[in-house]
Image (cartoon, helix red, strand yellow):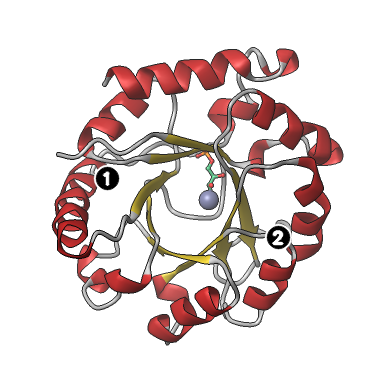
Amino acid sequence: MKAPDIRIAPSLLSADFARLGEEVRAIEAAGADMVHFDVMDNHYVPNLTIGPLVCEAIRPHVTVPIDVHLMVEPVDALIPLFARAGAEFITFHQEANRHVDRTLSLIREHGCKPGLALNPATPLSVLEHVLDKVDMVLLMSVNPGFGGQKFIPATLAKIEALRARLDAHQNDDGHAIWLQIDGGVNADNIGAIRRAGADTFVAGSAVFGAPDADRGYRTIMRRLREHAQNR
Ligand code: DX5
Ligand code: ZN
């Protein structure tokens, strides 16, 4: 198996929304590689969060990429808005979109990196005709809609299967595709998730709910990285 770099993307969903600017500065200073930005619409998922205005507001506070995870239906109208708001990655759910190929192109046309998210029950076969167009595949390891849920163990076998598929694809055309895991990631399971083949880790409650939260998240970020690297 290849050993791509590890990236940790704290999810703002568990941050203090009254202090978002400070929160994103703190996680970047603590070593975050990306800021994971969860967008929920109370339609595709039963929860409602933040949109392009908030993305635009936090953009000047960090230098790392903003990784927008759209849990919305429909998707397309939000793409230009998030591109303008400073998103680097825009990921949407395969199940929330009738024209996946078109939406992936639209994201790239707007200067962003396209990601495709698969729910726990969505088979990897949906990737078959779109791998050339994605820069990241997001496997959900919980059902989308809420932070603080428990990691679904069957995801590990799915990660292994996807890793094999991505390695074969990358060998064909040299196009690196990141494998992101989202949901229930913590210091106890990140080693196993890494061993299975993930390279990009979203962590919400594990970071923002950590005991060192008031000291700037450095301890938890270091722990996550060490546990991921020690495999
Ligand atoms: C869930 C979101 C996740 C969530 C992860 O629908 O997509 O990004 O914030 O939170 P934790 O790490 O607490 O599971
Ligand atoms: Zn997410």
Picture coordinates of residue 99 (x, y %)? 42, 87
Residue 192 horizontal side relative to residue 206, left or right? left
Residue drawn at x 71%, y 36% as measured from the top left: 15
**Can you identify the residue that label 1 sits on?**
155
Residue 49 shows up from this direction? yes
Q: Does 220 sit above or below residue 159?
A: above
Q: Does 75 sit above or below residue 172?
A: below
The quadrant of the picture occupied by the C terminus is top left
Mark-to-mark CA distance, 2 and 1: 31 Å
Residue drawn at x 59%, y 41% as measured from the top left: 11
Counting labels gives 2
The three-letter code of the residue at mark 2 reads Gly
The three-letter code of the residue at mark 1 reads Thr
Residue 122 horizontal side relative to residue 161, left or right? right
Q: Is 63 or 228 nearer to us in this picture?
A: 63
Picture coordinates of residue 1 (x, y %)? 14, 39
Q: Assess disc 1: are there few (<14), some (14-19) or many (≥20) residues with their C-alpha within 10 Å of its C-alpha.
A: some
Residue 189 shows up from this direction? no
Residue drawn at x 43%, y 53% as measured from the top left: 143
First of labels 2, 1 by sequence position = 2
Picture coordinates of residue 127 (x, y %)? 26, 70
What is the number of the mark on residue 105?
A: none
Helix, strand or loop status at disc 1: helix
The reply to whether dot 2 and dot 1 touch (C-beta < 8 Å) is no
**Can you identify the residue that label 2 sits on?**
86
Name the image quarter holding residue 79: bottom right
Judged from this view, the residue extending furthest toward the front is 174
Helix, strand or loop status at disc 2: loop
